[in-house]
Image (tube, rainbow, N blue to C red):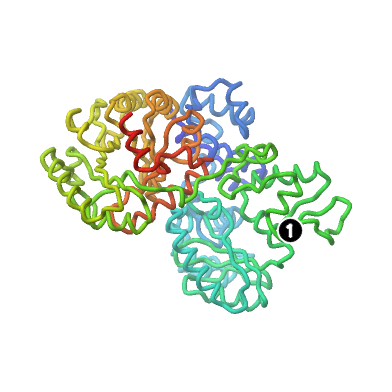
Amino acid sequence: MVNNHQISQIFEEMAELLELSGENIFRVRAYQKASQIIGGLTKNARDLSQKELLEIPGIGKGIAAGIEEMGRSGKLQDLEKLRSRFPKGLLEILRVPGLGPKRAMILFSKLKIDSVDKLREAIERGKLRELDGFGAKLEENIRKGLTFAQGAGKRMLYWNARLLMQDMLKVLKGFPEVVEAVPAGSYRRGRETVGDLDILCTARDGVKVLEHFAKLPQVERVLAQGESKASVLLRAGLQCDLRVVPPHSFGAALQYFTGSKDHNVVLRELALKKGYSLNEYGLFKLSDKEHKRPVAGKTEEEIYKMLGLATIPPELRENRGEIQAAQENRLPRLIEMKDVRGDFHNHTFHTDGRHSMEEMAHAAEKMGWEWVAIGDHSQSLKVARGLSVESLRKSFRELQEVQKKLPRLHLLRSMEVDILKDGSMDYPDAVLEEIDVVVASVHSAFNLPESEMTDRIKKAIRNPHVDIVGHLSGRLLGRRESYQVDTEEVLKEGALTQTAFEINGQPQRQDLWDVHAHRAKELDVPLALTTDAHAVEQFEYMALAVIQARRAWIEKEDVLNSLSIKELKEWLKN
């Protein structure tokens, strides 16, 4: 029986094969969008009726019929037919920088190249340069691109992209010709992974700035360079584009290149209804056919204002109702780092962390927090040296000694306690009662059927000593898929018991992910932002938890982290 992840993957492959076939781009995008939508649903798409599916924005009759077919048979016949037309290795070739569907098809039809290995062999023999439209230079670029084929074809974790972006911006802003430089694209929206990087800047000498950019130490190869834009392939495997824009259109360009595409489409439609034309150069009256006199464009704020909207934070620009909310002046006041008073989920060297309780406590104090619950793993997680009951009780006494040294920081003892296969907890109730904050997580038996996994987690939620459910989906981005669980049913159980769910800021987790966290807010489920820190520097992951919370429309009042120590203890008691 297919789950949402499998349906999402099937639609993603459909989009890739349709693009390879030279299919209509609108049909390709329809499958790409469907893949994203289904991957983010909290309900099982296979269980929805045709009417319910068609009520989901972005799902049309063809997509709905495909979901129904997969629900019955587990397969999509249209995909099976497409697969039969192409060798499996041809998809890998598409991910090599310098190649697209057209060139890949030329290589396949002329040289029978249907794998990365065959492509590499053809380049070594100088075969590509013999083809019309290729030549020696393109062959060399493709050869270099092969080195990055795996990395360039994958998305980078947001945190890694953040570190890379920060380094590049620091260098760029140091050039005297640069007036302002800011990130755009999916990075600015805080997507959990990033496919490429976009930077916008204003400059006193744009050409000079682009020359500097092409020589940054992070750059492996220049793909294109002109008077207002340069595209490079970074050593990290991502493409990065720098655009130099004039100050009078900087806001319009920033809005346009931040996206998302779906958000921008709706915004442009709204502009047309109001008698304007909106593009990356500014907002123009429709009567201004040549776009000579923009009525807005210097800042994003003035563009949204001219369209009768409150300014929409970048994290919300995914066409999930944010434009209507802005029209009705009911955008949320999104949570900020300054609202966070502490952390619930982390680990010391008693289990698989790198630092002591005291070191973690000092690091928490440096974060400016009022309190911190210092945690570890429970006894069954042998790979992380989980604590026995005896060792756990010894750690209570150690924490008391640390507390004496840090009178301004309130310390609590948290534990990430395993939810065992049958839904029972890894410590007896009498022991759980001694722990200040119990974070219940699944760390084993990932392959249970959906109904069993759902019942397993619901049983843990009903345990009166469980305060927070940890990383609900169990996914590790780029390494492990989510296990099968009915997220909607589990969240509703949390709403009944007022058990909190974490938004885990660990870069490979980011779990709850934004769509699920938003649904938790709708159901009035408490939320806890956590770092899952395994070292003192990883308390910085709280910034990532905040970003994902912002994407989920989360406000200060929705999270336990905004509570004072007195309020938190009262919540834990109740």
Q: Is residue 523 visible?
A: yes
Q: Is residue 122 visible?
A: no
| Residue for point 29% across, 48% down | 410
Disc 1 packing (10 Å; few <14; some 14–19; many ≥20): many
What residue is pinned by disc 1? 297
| Residue for point 48% across, 65% down | 166
State the image coordinates of residue 129 (x, y, percent, origin top left).
56, 69
The residue most toward the left is 390
Answer above or below: position of 443 versus 127. Answer: above
Q: Quadrant of the N terminus?
A: top left
Q: 173 or 30: nearer the eye?
A: 173
| Residue for point 79% across, 50% down | 277
Query: Which amino acid is tagged 1?
Result: Gly
Answer above or below: position of 266 versus 456. Answer: below
State the image coordinates of residue 265 (x, y, percent, origin top left).
69, 45
State the image coordinates of residue 236 (x, y, percent, origin top left).
44, 64
The image quadrant that residue 494 belongs to is top left
Q: 310 or 563: nearer the eye?
A: 563
State the image coordinates of residue 246 (x, y, percent, origin top left).
71, 68
